[in-house]
Image (cartoon, coloured by chain):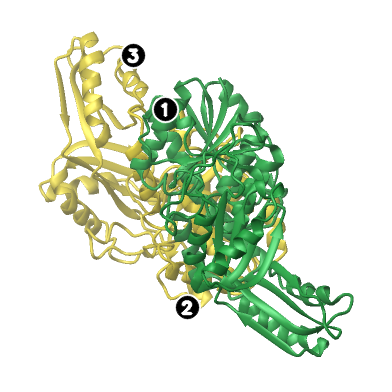
Chain colours: A yellow, B green
Amino acid sequence: MALIVHKYGGTSMGSTERIRNVAKRVAKWHRAGHQMVVVPSAMSGETNRLLGLAKELAPSKASLSYERELDMLASTGEQASSALLAIALQAEGLQSVSYAGWQVPIRTNNAYTKARIESIDDARVRADLDAGKVVIVTGFQGMDDEGNITTLGRGGSDTSAVAVAAAMKAQECLIYTDVDGVYTTDPRVVPEARRLKTVSFEEMLEMASLGSKVLQIRSVEFAGKYRVPLRVLSSFTPWDIDIHAEAASGTLITFEEDENMEQAIVSGIAFNRDEAKIALRGVPDKPGIAYQILGAVAQANVDVDMIIQNISKDGKTDFSFTVNRGDYAKTMDLLRASVLPGLGLDDLVGDTKICKVSIVGIGMRSHVGIASKMFRALSEEGINIQMISTSEIKTSVVIDEKYIELAVRALHKAFDLDQPATA
Amino acid sequence: MALIVHKYGGTSMGSTERIRNVAKRVAKWHRAGHQMVVVPSAMSGETNRLLGLAKELAPSKASLSYERELDMLASTGEQASSALLAIALQAEGLQSVSYAGWQVPIRTNNAYTKARIESIDDARVRADLDAGKVVIVTGFQGMDDEGNITTLGRGGSDTSAVAVAAAMKAQECLIYTDVDGVYTTDPRVVPEARRLKTVSFEEMLEMASLGSKVLQIRSVEFAGKYRVPLRVLSSFTPWDIDIHAEAASGTLITFEEDENMEQAIVSGIAFNRDEAKIALRGVPDKPGIAYQILGAVAQANVDVDMIIQNISKDGKTDFSFTVNRGDYAKTMDLLRASVLPGLGLDDLVGDTKICKVSIVGIGMRSHVGIASKMFRALSEEGINIQMISTSEIKTSVVIDEKYIELAVRALHKAFDLDQPATA
């Protein structure tokens, strides 16, 4: 008998029919002898509906008080779906109880709309499990030190599930979603994309941060920090498939590099259309210049992704970085108004028609020449590389947006990702 | 500066447009110098939508666990509308914060779906009021001793508002609804029905228990127990009408019989189509017989309203009572199965085609002949009276359902309710 956490996304909870299927699946796991904790998202569309109502009424200026109310509002979606799932489980003949984040309690800081989990008290949940109940814990939410409801940001239910699994030392946390695992890249772009049976935690972290939408990045960080075995699998298989087949399906995010792991050098191709590039040309090359530019950007709460500074020439250098496309106009305005005048700058250029394509693989640590193989594959397709950024297990390039599918397909082929990896 | 509680029903909160109007109205009161606590219902239709989903998934047998989840589910409607109202108030430039029942906290017993308020801690709300905030408290819900969410039953937001007003010693509790006050009877039945400017707490209590839907009966009981001045008024007047006119509109439920009160002997006519009549004829007239019959009924959780036992003849008597029409079949089955055999009974008859019509008036205490005037008015219309029940301030009769409108109109006229009362 093991303690297992299941997490079901909004699509999986999208109707009473689907909730009934989730209940039957959970019941199967419970009857197989497992202690079950289930973390559901809100029914699909519900969070958007609620936030849409808020938007119609919103004050012109956001504030902490406003964000507090957004969390009061949005958290109701998960509370409702959790209660419905508990009811559906009772209809299956199981004992079941649902808890809102504050009832567990799941304690967070007070950063409304993007709070971070600080602690989880597992006493109440464990007592129920020991009494034979299936326990439903609302995803996406917690409570701050003053008893206010907080939410964890979009996709936060993944993080809730992993955090609960960590706190309860669950044997595995199964993330049921509308795809059947983590792929070498998006199958909508590359039909030959292959599902990975396993992927290392570090690769998953890079993929999540590089644009893969399968898991919220903070849930992967959490899984890494507490070493929670995490599996991504489909909720659209029939609920009554063999439990052993189900338990081995999808993609397992692992921490041990054991011998059974796939030994690909590159595990996947991630890509991201959400960025924009900003370049300051002819910046005086003197100490503190990066801070002078990016300090102002950070103060405006804009996240910077890639940062490139070229070797200087004649005491001047080029300084480029990328930001989320939604922050582009704001950042350009900011630079023009408050940074450029102080720099006596030659030139500011921006480009929103770019994309970032990345290869990710834990094998890159021990293999040389992977990056140059990537550059050659792109060059053979006539794709010009605008920026490059590397880390131990990934290489990212910024290219013209129009080449995105071509680049992803070329790299997928160049690294043989359509073929199962050999040991 | 006074502390005022406003309560808004589901229709008043039915859209973002209407919520904005509620916010403007509350803002007007706040700017006039009042400390404001607002208790909103869920947006109209929302509670039914949620409970409809639960019904689709419900187990075949109700249980405490199931009812607990119903409360988890249904309470989200008020939490969402409260957050939306807080947001709308912020958009009006006010400081505002919303609290779910458990955050106040409003403590109740654990009778899920029909819990009773036991205590309210006003410290948090009072601190916010003193800081100049408008405080929104979710209606309809509270928390039991073990931290489970409870709800107070249909119309429970009225009770929440009165309980909050009592706990905070508010100067007045204003119940905004889709009618503009308490009428001498339902204007849909008698177009000449007249709005009462004041009605005594005791009369309101009788009217609520006799079928008037304007206020939940428990909210009136609560108001009586804690002497909370209560006013029922319309939320569909323009939000910017003069605040003094608004404060004097609707119907005030009073506790003092002061000289300005209307001095009608009969204040209103209530009626109720929801009952059914059950008669056991030829019951042995011996001690314990009423308990033998009604004990079994009470054990099945069926509420009995009127109970009539006639004078006995030849050691036998007739025993009649009324129950809610929804409990009729269950009660008849129960009597046949477990009560009749032990009584050696002659006859059991039931009738669902009945209604109850009542006259209510505090003046009945000091005036004789009111009941006989009622019986004469009905007799003149050829209406046969099947059962009679009286209390200090009301007389109720059971008649054939088909005469309901005729009876109400005849009584309304007989007691001159279409004319303003004279002092």
Query: Which residue corresponds to mark 3?
Result: A288
Please provide percent x and percent y for residue B180. 45, 43
Q: Earlier in the sequence, mark 2 or mark 1?
A: 1
Q: Quadrant of the C terminus of chain A?
A: bottom left
For mark 1, what is the residue?
A63
On residue A33, the disc is none
How far apart, in angstroms, are the residues tagged by discs 3 and 1? 33 Å
Depth check, mark 3 against mark 1: the one in front is 1
Give the secondary structure at mark 1.
Answer: loop
Q: How many marks?
A: 3
Q: CA distance from mark 3 to mark 2?
A: 61 Å
Q: Quadrant of residue B60?
A: bottom right
Structural crowding at the residue carrying mark 1, measured as other residues with C-alpha within 10 Å and reported as few (<14), some (14–19) or many (≥20) = few
Q: Are marks 3 and 2 in contact (CB under 8 Å)?
A: no
At label 2, counting other C-alpha atoms closer than 10 Å, the crowd grade (few under 14, some 14-19, many 20 or more) is few
Q: Quadrant of the N terminus of chain A?
A: bottom right
Marks 2 & 1 on one chain: yes
> Is residue B343 visible to the viewer in this orientation of the structure?
yes
Amino acid type for the residue under numbered disc 3 = Gly
Which is in the foreground here, disc 3 or disc 2? 2
Mark 2 residue type:
Ile
Residue depicted at x 59% and y 64%: B376
Q: Tell if the residue under mark 3 belongs to the same chain as the one under mark 1.
A: yes
